[in-house]
Amino acid sequence: MDTDTQAVVIGAGPCGLATAGQLLRRGVRVRIFEALPEPARGSRAIMLWPPAQAVLDDLEMLDAARGQAHTPGRLDYHGDTGRLVSVGLRARQAPLVLPQSRTDALLESAVRRSGGTVERDRRLVSLTQRDDTVEVVVRDGAGRHEQLCTRWLIGADGVHSTVRELLGVAFTGSALPTPFILAEGPLSGVRVPDVPAYYLTSRGGMVIAPLPKGRYRVAGSAVDGQEATAGFIQDILDTRGPGGLRMDDIETLTTFSSSERIAARMRSGRVLLVGDAAHTHSAVGGQGLNLGLQDVRNLAWKLAGVLGGTLDEAVLDTYEPERLAAARQIVKATGDVTRVALARPPWSGLRNAVLRIAERTPPAQSRYAATVAGQRIRYPTSALGRPAGFRRTGLPAPGWAAAATTAGDRFTLLTCGPSDGPLSIAAEALTRRYPALLSHHQLRRRRREFLLIRPDGYVAVRGRPKDLPRTERLLTAIGSDPQPTERSAMPHRHDDHQTYEAHAATFRKWADSIMDGDVEAYASCWAPDAVAEDIAMGMETRGVRDISAAAARWFEAIVDQKIILLAQLEGDGYSAVMWELSAQAQGTFTELSTDVRPGSRFTKQGMSAFRFNDQAQFVWERSHWDRASVLRQIEAPHDD
C-alpha cells in the first residue's frame, strides 16, 4: 500500500488540476485520479475572471492563457428597443474568454511541469478516515483495485461528487426553473458583437459571447420540452438579437439547466471539497470557474503550509467558513441576476429603467464591474480572514496593493510611507522574526498605513502603525515559532558607566536644544548633517523627512533595544508620542521608566510625564513637555 502520498486529489477538471498544481509546486507529494479515460472536450465554462486568472498566474500559465483567449473590455446590455447600458471593465477586471478544454490543458501542463501525472480511468471506491490519515481505494477500468494511505484527500469531482456522497454530506438547494439552449460556431452579419452582449427582451433572454478564433457562443432561455435545434438558435437571433445575424455552421448544440446548491460542509476531518463538488449556481455571469478556483487558492497555501510545518493545522479551520461564505454570496448574486434578467412585465420595465439610469451613473457601473469580476467577495470575521475590530479586511487586496504582492507562499506585509520611517523599520524587524511566513514590501504613499496580504491575495489586516502588534499576534497564532529577536545588553551602572554617561549627555543635549530653540544642536542629536523639524515646538528646520524615524533611532541608542515609535499627528502638531514595546524591550524599558530603587535611570518626579496604557504602549504627553520634566528624566547612576 502506498503510504508516501501527502495529498490525494479526486477529479481532474480545472479545480482538481489546479489543486494538484498548486500543491506540487509547493513540494507536496500528490496523486490525482480521474474517472474518465480521456480529457473532457468542449467549451463548457469559458469566463476566467481575475480571481481565476490569479490561479493561472500562480502556476505561471497566465501569459499562455492570454495568448489564446479573447479579452473583452466591456459588457453590453440591450432591451427590446436598443442598448440599455454598457459596463466598462478596467484592465484588472476584464475576463479571459477561453474554452474550458484549453484551460484544462494549461492546468494539466502545470501539473506535469511540477512532476505530477493525472491517473485516468481510476474511480474512487471508498475512503476511511483515521486519526492522522485517510485510507483510499481506487478501481481502474479493468477492475483492479489499489489501496493507498494519504494525509489529506481533496474532492474535486464535480456536481455528482463521489467524495461528497461517501462522506454523507448533504447538498441542499433546488433546480432553477428555466432551461437554456446553447450553440457555438461562426457567426455572420453586419452587427456581430465584439464583446459579450446580453439581450433582455420581452421574448426571453439571450447572450452572444465572442470566443477565440472567430467563433461565438449563443445561448437563450427556453421553455421545458423545447428541443435544441438550429431553427431555435436562428429564431432567437432574429427575434431577440440585433437582427441580421446567422449561425449556419453550428459546431456545438446542447440544452442545459442550472441548480442552486451548497454542500452542508466543505471539510470533514481530513477530507476537503472544492469547486462544483461543494457548490453549484446559475450559469448567468460565468462565475463557476471563478468560485471553484478561488476555493483552490484559499486551500492550497494553507494545506501546503501545514504539511510543510510552517503553519499550525488550526489554520485549516478557516477554509470552510470562508469558502462557504463565498459560495453563498455567489449563489445569491447569480440567482438574483438570473431572475432580474428573465423578468416579465411589469418588472422588466422597472429593470430596464434602472439599467438606463446606470448608463449615466459611473459609480453604479464601477460597483457592478467589481462584483462580476469577483472582487467583492468578503470573508467572515475570523482570526485569519477578517480579524475583529479591523475594517476593510477580508476582501481582495486593492489594485495598488495587489500589484506589489510578490511573496509567493508567504504573507506580504505592505507598508506605506517613508522607506526609513518607523513603520517600515518595524515591519523589517517583524519580517526577520517570521522569515518563513512574511515578506516585507514598501510603497511610497502619503497615507501611513500597512496591509497584511495573505498568499491568496486577501487582506488579513489593514491598519495604522499602532495596529502592527496585532499583526504579530496573528502570525504567532497561525505559524510556527518565530525567530528569536536579537537583544543587545543594556549598559548597566555597574559595568558600563561611561556608556551610560554618554547616553545621559545626549538626552540633556536634546532637551536643552528643544527648550532653547537651538535647531543645530537639536539636529545633531539625530544624525550627522541633518537638520530636523519638530512640529510640536514649531521650529524652522530642514533635512529630516520624518521626525518619527529620527526619534526611533535616538531611542535605540538610549535603550539599546528595538522600540517601535508610533508618532500620532493630531491637529497642527504632535499631541502625543507613543512607543509600542516589543516583548523583549518591554522588560528593559519598564525598568528604565518605573524602577525607582537606588541607581534607577528615571526619578519619581520625572515620571509625571509618562504613562503606560493597556496595550503596553509608552506615551509621553505633549502637555508635560516642559524643561524641568525633561531634564529630570536622567539621573546619574549611583556607585555601590
Image (cartoon, rainbow, N blue to C red):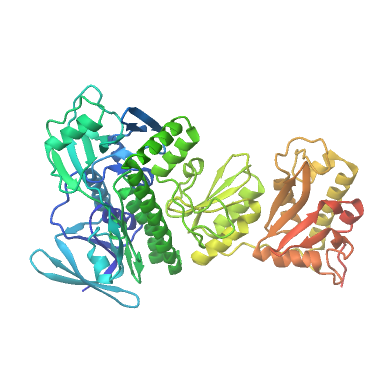
Left or right: 443, with 92 as reference point: right
Residue under the image location 90 percent in, 63 percent down: 605
Residue 284 or residue 598, whichever sits in front = 284
Left or right, 400 with reference to 169: right
Q: Position of residue 261 (x, y in %)?
A: 31, 58
In the picture as drawn, the residue positioned furthest to the top comes out as 190
Quadrant location of the N terminus?
Answer: bottom left
Q: Residue at x 22, y 31 (%)?
A: 239
**Is residue 384 shown to the viewer in this render?**
yes
Location of residue 284 (image quadrant): top left
Vertically, is 226 above or below 7?
A: above
User: Image check: 538 left or right of 118?
Assistant: right
Q: Quadrant of residue 560?
A: bottom right
Q: Position of residue 188 (x, y in %)?
A: 18, 26
Locate residue 251, reporting x and y percent: 13, 38
Task: Give the residue at x 14% y 68%.
Answer: 139
Left or right for 614, reference 386: right
Residue 634 makes an appearance in the image = no
Q: Position of residue 305 (x, y in %)?
A: 41, 62
- Residue 123 is drawn in which quadrant? bottom left
